[in-house]
Image (cartoon, grey):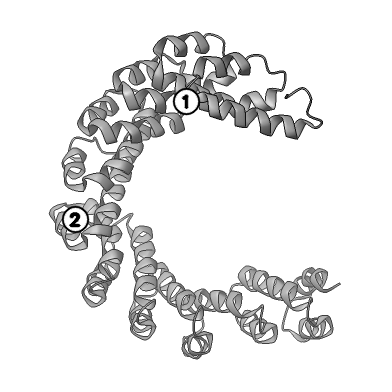
Amino acid sequence: MLKAMDTPSEKRIATGDLLGNLSWSETRLAFDLLNQLDDPATRREQLGNLMFYAAWSSSTLLTEQTAKLTDREKVESADQVLRGLVKTDPETAKKYFLSLPEAQRTPQSLQQMMREYAAKDSKAALDFALSLGNPQEQNAAVTGLFSNWGSEDPEAAANGLKKLPPGEGRLGALNSIATAWAKNDPLGAREWAESLSGNERVRALAAVLPSMAKDDPAAASQQLSSLLASPPDGMAKNLATSAGSLAATWAADDPTSAAGWAASLPTGQGRDEGIGSVAKAWTQYDAVAAAQWIGTLPVGTSRDAAVKPLVAQVRQTDPPTAFSWASSITDPADRVNQLKETLKSWRGTDLKSARAALEAADLTDDDRIKLRKEVE
């Protein structure tokens, strides 16, 4: 039947359907058919799925088929093999991973395996992660483990965190726990965050407070403001991101209050992120009110952060207004980029007016020449 089909695409689709139907019930037969294919693209597309079912259902079949794979195929199918093994036999999955040459042991494969392992036995998974001598592999294992463990059982994951050595893996695990815990129990997550010390406490609070703002934005914003007023070394970026997330959450329900809070923050990245997030949320459903507020902001980076989402929101429906706002941006690169995107929208409806606005704009000769390309 496959040979009678006219086009390669028809054969590829039919082959995929056939192998997909056979893979879980007749895995050996599916491999026999796969090994007869003369189309490398179709073989690559189907191999991973079959290797998953072999790993999941038969160690003998897995061993047989692994011996037939090229080095490239071993790398490309490692994710699926490990995922299949860890569902039924985590010990074998660990041995399989460690048996691979280091060049074939990718962080992605390890992370996927650890996510599955965490669902079966998180404590054993932690022991395995800590046993890895390669720091990069240990970080990847910890990332995969805690991305699942933090969601399923954050309190147990928080206890597991205590066993991790300082480093990138511990910080990533802390973020995973805080973010997942805060989604379902923000007050419990904050209590845990407060039990930490130093930068770990601040990092955890930065992840927790935006979720807390859904129920108590006043308390969450007050605590974040205190942290932003005197950020510990290395925490400014985390706190700025938190300010943006908190402002977006608050602005969805009460943009006026969120705007007042964001504008009260100390000058810096946190204020920029907060004001930009308020503007983005507000302009989506009331661009006029948002524009009136943005017009009250002093010239500078925070105002620029608010103008950009306003321009993006209105340039499709009111390009002259968008062009005017974009022209007010103080950062030269951001200004040119926003003008460029606005001209792209404007030229489709009124090319003549777009050209006239560009020629009248207060721009350098170089910027004007660059932007003329958008209205040729």
Q: Can residue 256 be seen in this view?
A: yes
Q: Nearer the viewer, mark 1 or mark 2?
A: 1
The residue under label 2 is 193
Amino acid type, callout 2 = Ala
What is the secondary structure assignment of the residue under circle 1?
loop
Q: Which of 363 and 189 is in front in this view?
A: 189
Relative side of 261 to 193, left or right: right
Does residue 329 appear in this view? no
Helix, strand or loop at label 2? It is helix
- Tell me the residue at 65%/85% (across/down): 324
The quadrant of the picture occupied by the C terminus is bottom right
Figure quadrant of residue 349 = bottom right
Quadrant in the rendering for residue 96 = top left
Query: How many marks can you see?
Result: 2
Residue 104 image position (x, y, % from top left):
50, 21
| 103 relative position to 18: left or right | left
Task: Name the residue at 46% across, 28% down.
Answer: 79
Q: How far is mark 1 from mark 2, CA to CA?
A: 45 Å
Which of 169 and 315 lies nearest the eye of the viewer? Answer: 315
Residue 259: image location, x then y, percent = 38, 82
Which of disc 2 and disc 1 is earlier in sequence? 1
- Residue in the image at 29% along x and 43% along y: 173
